[in-house]
Image (cartoon, rainbow, N blue to C red):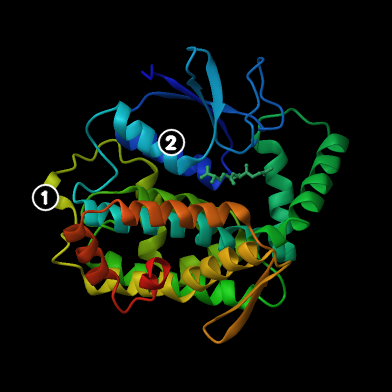
Amino acid sequence: MSLTTPITLLGVPGSPYTRKMLAVLRYRHIAYRLILASHRAPPGGLPRAKVPLLPTFYLPGPSGALEAVTDSTPIIRLFEREFSGRSVIPTDPAMAFINDLLEDYGDEWLTKAMFHYRWYYKPDIDHAGDVLPLWSSELLSDADFAKAKQDIIERQVSRLYVVGSNDTTASVIEDSYRRYLAIMEELFRHQRYVLGERPSSADFAAYGQLTQLTKVDPTPMAVTWREAPRVNAWVDRVDDLSGLEPQETEWTRRDAIPQSLRDLLGEVGRGYVPVMLANEKALADGAAEVKTEVEGKTWVQKPFPYQAKCLKWLRESYRALSPADRSAVDGILHGTGCERLFA
Ligand SMILES: N[C@@H](CCC(=O)N[C@@H](CS)C(=O)NCC(=O)O)C(=O)O
């Protein structure tokens, strides 16, 4: 495939994965055309994706015709193959693997905080209901706006179960988010990005979720502004890194892992790891419910097949490492709880 620019994508400002991809495109100097619209109603005869999600990219398929493609993580890897320079994947395969893991944590765990805070508390629900219908740039009468607000609230609140937000898990999600903030605040005392002095896809994944948690939804916004000013400012900076000139030497080296990165991996090991493993097991057993413990508290949710796929992909990239690189990864993950994913 040979991609021509500008690349067309469909998205909205309230979609964390749209924000993740826009920031990657800006940083990588890949020209794009963002169409502000819902994935349920792509304008101008654009096709719907098989699994309609935002962002939806329009990329040439085997026949050259544009196809609707989703899923930010593999699309980032496609762009790495298609466009040179300003890579968001560390050059060292061991660090690239750590980046894969942290990107998935951003996409699959931090999103629980994002969706939970937005649709669990009354002031956040009300605010999201006010702004989301207007972000796809529709002109709405007051009556249509009121109906759109009510519809989106009903639809999204009824989907809290997808991320596992409920009365049992609410405090687990919030405790985990606040521990994450404290760890990142410490990391940003010593370095500018998750894996050194240049951004990786792990930054962009977390940034995407945090665009909402730090700038849109009132409850997590207050928490983040109060507890993590460096994290808040990092979100603003990652938004547009088009002027940064990254150097190869700026990646964190496998033999110089800072304590705060170890602490971040330890946090991944506390929540994401047991829940990903329990989800995989529930699906394999055909169980109706995922049940496990996070930090001594109960976690319960419906199984989520996509996250079992994410775990399978991570294991595949772990197995694809050379023995020397795998042993370096094992050394980095040792004692963080993350090693359980690959045991
Ligand atoms: N794994 C996908 C997730 C994309 C995703 O979940 N997008 C959300 C919006 S941020 C969505 O479209 N949800 C379905 C809906 O709102 O109907 C990715 O990385 O792109």
Residue 57 drawn above or below residue 24: above
Quadrant of the image occupied by residue 264: bottom left
Q: Which residue is more in the foreground, 170 or 283? A: 283
Q: Crowding near pointer 2: few (<14 within 10 Å), some, many (20+)?
A: some
Residue 25 locus on image (x, y percent): 38, 33
Identify the mark nearer the N-term, 1 or 2: 2
Residue marked by disc 2: 75
Residue drawn at 71 percent across, 32 percent down: 40
Question: How many residues crowd around disc 1 within 10 Å: few (fewer than 14), some, or many (20 or more)?
Answer: few
Q: Quadrant of ligand 1?
A: top right
Whether residue 289 can be seen here: yes
Q: Nearer the viewer, residue 56 or 288?
A: 288
- Amino acid under label 2? Ile
The amino acid at mark 1 is Thr
**Quadrant of res 186:** bottom left
Where, quadrant-wise, is the N terminus in this rendering? top left
Q: Position of residue 311 (x, y in %)?
A: 47, 57
Residue under the point 71% across and 66% down: 121
Dot 2 beta carbon under 8 Å from ligand 1: yes
Q: Which residue is mark 1?
A: 249
